[in-house]
Amino acid sequence: MKKLIDEITEVVTKAFVENGYDEKYGKVTVSNRPDLCEYQCNGAMAAAKEYKCAPFMISDKIAESLSGSEMFSAVESVKPGFLNMTLSPEYVAKYMNRMKEDDRFGCEKDPNPKTIIVDYGGPNVAKPLHVGHLRSAIIGESIKRIARYMGHNAIGDVHLGDWGLQMGLIITELKERKPDLCYFDEAYEGEYPEEAPFTLSELEEIYPTASGKSKEDETFKNAALDATNELQQGRRGYRALLKHILDISIPDLTKNYANLNVSFELWKGEKDAAPYIPDMVQMLKDKGFAHISEGALVVDVKEETDSKEIPPCIILKSDGSSLYATTDLATMVWRMQDYNPDAMIYLADKRQELHFIQCFRTAKKTGIVNEDTDLTFIGFGTMNGKDGKPFKTREGGVMRLENLVNDVNEEMYQKISENRKSKEDLDISEEEARETSKKIALAAIKYGDLSNQTVKDYIFDIDRFTSFEGNTGPYILYTIVRIKSILAKYEATGKNPDAAGEILPSVNASEKKLNLAIAGFAGAIQSAYTEKAPHKICAYIYELAEAFNGFYHETKILSEEDEARQLSFIKELQLTRDILLTCIDLLGFEAPERM
């Protein structure tokens, strides 16, 4: 099923060709003046230069050719050469009926499905998730879901930070506290204990303590660097400690990601890339890609077209230790071996752009990935507080993600509790109120983030995000719940909302506006996928929700006496509901039954 805009473009293009003009001039767009028309074509303006005539002479001919089409109720040529078009209610109704019979509402899957690995999450083990992890998690999850909806095999990888200096810091601090542990005895040859010598809460305290020490104590820092190198070189005791750290950290990370409705198909980390590093490094040397610079092994990646200096990609430090670039490249090696992906998408703070330019160029230049493997970096902006600075706790520290989610949950619970008190007939149990508040809170958080362009910074405003009015997640959910309520009332009268029935031509402007908004579904999803832009879906569902609520306020749905007309309304409601539910699933949240 073609997108509505494509069907219109096809008809208009045919008119251009039949009148002797090139088909490229028939492109149609949504009108930027909805007060004048619904769709427009500006092709005559460009065609006039080629055909050496006034633009309106061309637009007049096209308008005349289209005047008899059942697709339009009006086609107007407006000087100096614009084509303004309004669709006929009959044509729109036919399109709606095709949409409601299609499981995907007219959104076709990509005919060439790809394997896409989405690298998002990126938390360091042994540390709790904080607000800085929010954006990569929910943007990455949405991009993965959108890609899957378009028919691709999208695989999410958490890409744990479990191999760098943070591991050496933890090991060094633990050695200072408990030097007699067998893990620090290089002569120890027995089996290491199954139980970790620390709890999760102890582990979460060890890392910041060690990090603070390393900034003030050069000896401690050097010891941590040595421990990191020894871990990477395979020291048994340190590898055993790393296993304990992972065994304790991953379940907690899994739980916290689950609270965000975020999941990963792969729980791989930097350590999983370690076995591939030696052969990769040897290949880079043997083929002449890598050379020694100031003691480090590097690959030059600058290009003649660069407008700014791009430094070499460092593969190994002078002491032989690996860096983020090393493990990122080795990760590409195993991904190509195990999955041979057509594309890899990386999400990280936009300030890491240089790192990914260096890695991507190295991977392409050295053949680590195929020439046609698409490598994409999606750099996101910062989540800021109302002061415009990176979001902090009231005490000025970095807020744990778990605490942020709990705060928004509580805010929503208080609003629901007030609603329960104000509506005596609203019989919602404490358990349902709590569960509902979680769903609305997650919608508030995710929509509040995803409705912004990824690259832009944004203000996390809990009062605005949790509002039931305006461009917010709760407003979208409230619209869905309102539709569910109307459908339930319709069914309570003894009528079947799933009975066979057609959507009839619209009877007023608000109904037609709703239908045109519904028809924009496929275009919004395909655009969000192509541009890797979840905010496109947010913009679409806000437009759809606004159109529905305008229709609802102007139309007596349940008191409509014409049963065929009433059933037509019901079919429009079902289509709106199903599309909204599909879209919020792609954004990573769901709707409650009641609010």
Image (cartoon, rainbow, N blue to C red):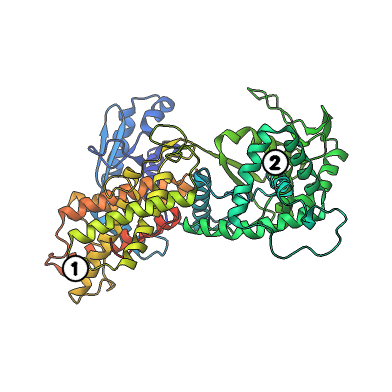
- Could you tell whether 198 is left or right of 466 in the image? right
Q: Secondary structure at mark 2?
A: helix
Residue 65 in view here:
yes
Q: Label 1 is placed on what type of residue?
A: Ala
Q: Quadrant of the C terminus?
A: bottom left
Q: Residue at x 51, y 53 (%)?
A: 141
Q: Label 2 is placed on what type of residue?
A: Tyr
* Res. 90 image quadrant: bottom left
The dot on residue 564 is 1
Placement of 390 over or under 108, stated as above or below:
above
Q: Which residue is mark 2?
A: 324
In terms of depth relative to the viewer, which is nearer, 562 or 85? Answer: 562
Badge 2 density bin: few <14, some 14–19, many ≥20, Cα 10 Å: some
* Res. 433 image quadrant: bottom left
- Percent across and percent down for residue 584 are 40, 55
- Percent across and percent down for residue 347 are 57, 44
Q: Residue at x 52, y 49 (%)?
A: 137
Could you give the CA–CA distance between mark 2 and mark 1, rounded to whole angstroms? Answer: 64 Å
Q: Quadrant of the N terminus?
A: bottom left
Placement of 239 over or under 294, stated as above or below:
below
- Percent across and percent down for residue 500 are 28, 72
Point out the residue furthest to the bottom here: 494
Badge 1 density bin: few <14, some 14–19, many ≥20, Cα 10 Å: some
Residue 71 in view here:
no
In terms of depth relative to the viewer, which is nearer, 291 or 68? Answer: 291
* Res. 46 image quadrant: top left
Q: Residue at x 37, y 29 (%)?
A: 45
Q: Residue at x 60, y 35 (%)?
A: 352
Q: Secondary structure at mark 1?
A: helix
